[in-house]
Image (tube, helix red, strand yellow):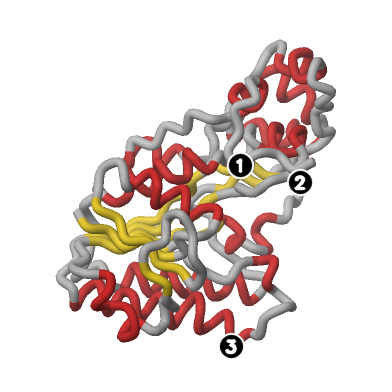
Amino acid sequence: MHVLVTGAAGLIGSGVAARLREDHDVTGLDLVAGEQVQVIGDCFDVADWRHRAGKIDAVVHVAALHAPHVGQRSEADFRQANVKATSRLLDFAVGAGACSFVLTSTTSLYGHALMPSGGAVWIDEQLQPQPRDIYDETKLLAEELVASASNALNVTSLRMSRCFPEPADVMAWYRLHRGIDRRDVAEAHALALSRKGPAATYVISAATPFHRDDCGDLSLDAPSAIERRCPGLIARTAQQGWMPPNSIDRVYDASLAARELGFAPRFGIEACLAADWDPLPSA
């Protein structure tokens, strides 16, 4: 297929474009140049770049304004970048005769529902989003637009968990319950691209060893819960100077994506212990 990947200069978009290029003809679109970018343009201004993009069979929409932009960009900017641009791209995909549309979404849109009350929050597709800011609001609206196009396209939204450079110990422990490696994010997009069926939304995160009935213990005494589910892990991470968190407030469950997409994340905390990171930890 010929796949258009938006946001192809960014951390996630570049990784997605590179992975899809293994199996497809990929055109990367972004406002700025980058290794994975072939067309420079704004997602909103489809008429400006559509002929340069060529015949498109599928769209993977990664580009967006993100949480760090809240307070720095106006609400109008968020609505244009995250909602109106998604609408324009959906119209473009339908008009181009494309078969699939994949939206890179975020677990951030769960918003206020992420706040624990009596134990860690178990987060899957059944939990109702409660947006807390313009970023969350506009990403949820984008998902709704994508779902509404299911009569014309195979549409999928991927709610990815935390994936950006942080201190090594933070990133490693997050891989147990709320983080993901960029390579696993890219693989999830490759799987979603070939999915057929009704509109679907999936939580995408590293595989967690925890069970829903661990939530009370995770909140009160995370080291005990970690040792019970991952015997010896705390001792091995201590050799890296990584101390376990005293409390864990949320767990992202990607089991639906595992069942329906065949998603099998490979880069969890064991990869971190082996110094196999993408992205690399911050200093």
The answer to whether residue 101 is seen in the rendering is no
- Residue type at mark 2 is Gly
Q: Nearer the viewer, residue 270 or 226?
A: 270
Label disc, if present, on residue 118 of the rendered structure: 2
Q: Nearer the viewer, mark 2 or mark 1?
A: 1
Sequence-first disc among 2 and 1 = 2
Q: Which corner quadrant holds the N terminus?
A: bottom left
Q: Residues within 10 Å of mark 2 (few under 14, many from 20)?
A: few
Give coordinates of residue 234: x percent, y percent. Answer: 76, 18
SS state under label 1: loop
Instruction: Point out the residue furthest to the bottom here.
Output: 76
Q: Residues within 10 Å of mark 3 (few under 14, many from 20)?
A: few
Using the rendered view, name the quadrant where residue 48 is placed. Answer: bottom left
Determine which residue is flagged by label 3: 76
Q: Residue at x 34, y 58 (%)?
A: 156
Q: Residue at x 67, y 22 (%)?
A: 273
Determine which residue is flagged by label 1: 279
SS state under label 2: loop
Instruction: Point out the residue furthest to the left here.
Output: 97
- Residue type at mark 3 is Ala
